[in-house]
Amino acid sequence: MSKALNILKEVFGYPAFRGQQAEVIAHLANGGDCLVLMPTGGGKSLCYQIPALLRDGVAIVVSPLIALMQNQVAALHEIGVRAAVLNSSLSQQEAAQAEQKLLAGEYDLLYVAPERLLTARFLNLITRIPIALFAIDEAHCVSQWGHDFRPEYSQLSVLHERFPKVPRIALTATADMDTRKEIIERLGLDVARVFVSSFDRPNIRYQIIDKTNSRSQLLTFIQAEHPGDAGIVYCLSRKKVEETTVWLADHGMRAVAYHAGMNMQERSQNQEKFLREEGIIMVATIAFGMGIDKPDVRFVAHLDLPKSIEGYYQETGRAGRDGQAANAWMVYGLGDVIQQRRMIEESQAQLKFKQVAARKLEAMLSLCETTTCRRLRLLSYFGEATDTAAPCGNCDVCLNPPQVWDATVEVQKALSCVYRTGQNFGAGHLIDVLRGNLTERVKQWHHDRISTFGIGKDLPERTWRAVFRQIVALGLLTTDSEGHGALQLIEASRLVLKGQQSVFLRLQTKPERSAGKRQTNDLVPLDSAERYLWEQLRSWRAKTAKEHGVPAYVIFHDATLHELVRLCPQTEDELRLVTGIGARKLDKYGNHLIEILRGC
């Protein structure tokens, strides 16, 4: 491990291993198989990159995304590591050259897509070279229960069958117990050691608010919390992605879109813009993001409810990879619950898949409606013990604790209204009946003549909307199977109507402008002189990144620039003490940095 630590310091520029990194590296370097569950930003890549440099031969890294491979290889080139990609982005001539260099032993790491790796031609090719290890990144893609299933991943057991003596490492940031079991089973990792790090991302502030006007709420959030910051906004539909992008652009935001309906060239251009430029907001469906290695994403916003906690955790985990303060913000309403349940019911999947999807949705709804710390809920879902853990103090529930009220009578009124109107109407019409609003539709159906007309006029519309949202989330109402959004009673409704079960709900309060004080992006407060130096460093980094054709963070992370400002090194020996500056970067950029920092 002394050699591994030396590589960490000299090549990667980090002073010490974090968490379980050292254990994983030692195990893999000694030839053992392992499954590594480590949160986004936890340093998973080092767990196979350092063993790749310690062991003889080339490390074959299986990765699902071309952009991710290219960015990781660009970052490795910056620190002098011999790495390459072999994927569909290469011309036939470029691919042939890469294969020749592979056979000549000129690579330490080779990144490939699972589709290419599984071809007979590629498998035969790598039988001709010494292989240091196989790394299977984003291993949750192997699971049919996971949120991002890729059929090709289920065939990767061939690596163990064809190369039984080559150690393998499977890595993911998101996997519940069912997904972990399937990864182990499908990849043949039965005797592998499992490393599970804490899923906690303490720098991320979780905030879920009631949806009223999602785009206006989003704009207010960005303007108040993240002006000029890079962020990701997730929407469920392509249409909503496009409309939200235009809306943000019309209000002065630098926003671009990404969804599967766009042509590949446009998607690639927008992704490159997001990765290489600063302050870009990416509005996207979940087609975007897996493996995105941009460290300075300051917020991830959801305008629609994710299907599962795994999906939510994976998507929000793209914020704050550099360890600095970031926000995971979401708006959520009754329509989201109805829409997700309808999608499950209308799915052509087998019954077992629908049951799993329904269970995952229920867990997501519980997170949304919780009256206790959201972070503890998340950690508990992933099997991390929270019995003795204290609330985080950095989520909206901890910062603005919700009040709970006995809403049994109001819920009985709501359920009774569903029954009296024939179980054929959505929440909007039911609220009109309860509040005694004599609308044309109420008159058309003569619902002004039923016993529930006006019995809820003492509560405002906003409160009734919250009541319906929460009782649907709690499973006391369901939606019609035809997909019209009509609310209907189920067996669980009977106990409440008969007074045999009480119902406690979150009390709706006036929406807060923010979950708390605006978090600063700075690791330390900067005075005017330091701010000037910070901007000089950022300007130099942007210029250098453009010259090298790589994203700015590949040159240096923000955290490294902050440390340069704080320490103000004046010599090469002092620069060596800065996190993120290894031998290669010191040699390439040391003089430039000293010139900028001189006399600070």
Image: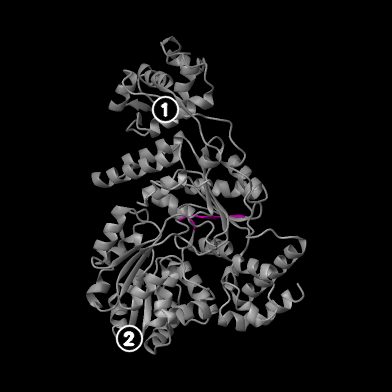
On screen, residue 45 above or below 443: below
Between 277 and 448, which is closer to the camera in this rendering? 277
Q: Residue at x 58, y 34 (%)?
A: 511
Q: CA distance from mark 1 to mark 2?
A: 64 Å
Q: Callout 2: few (<14), some (14-19), or many (20+) C-alpha neighbours within 10 Å?
A: some
Q: Which amino acid, by three-letter code, is at mark 2? A: Ile
To which residue does mark 1 refer? Answer: 504
Query: Quarter holding the N terminus?
Result: bottom left
Secondary structure of the residue carrying numbered label 1: strand
Q: Which amino acid, by three-letter code, is at mark 1? A: Phe
In-image side of 153 versus 518 (left or right): left
On screen, residue 160 above or below 142: below
Q: Callout 1: few (<14), some (14-19), or many (20+) C-alpha neighbours within 10 Å?
A: few
Q: Is residue 22 magenta?
A: no
Between 548 and 322, which is closer to the camera in this rendering? 322
Residue positioned most to the bottom: 104
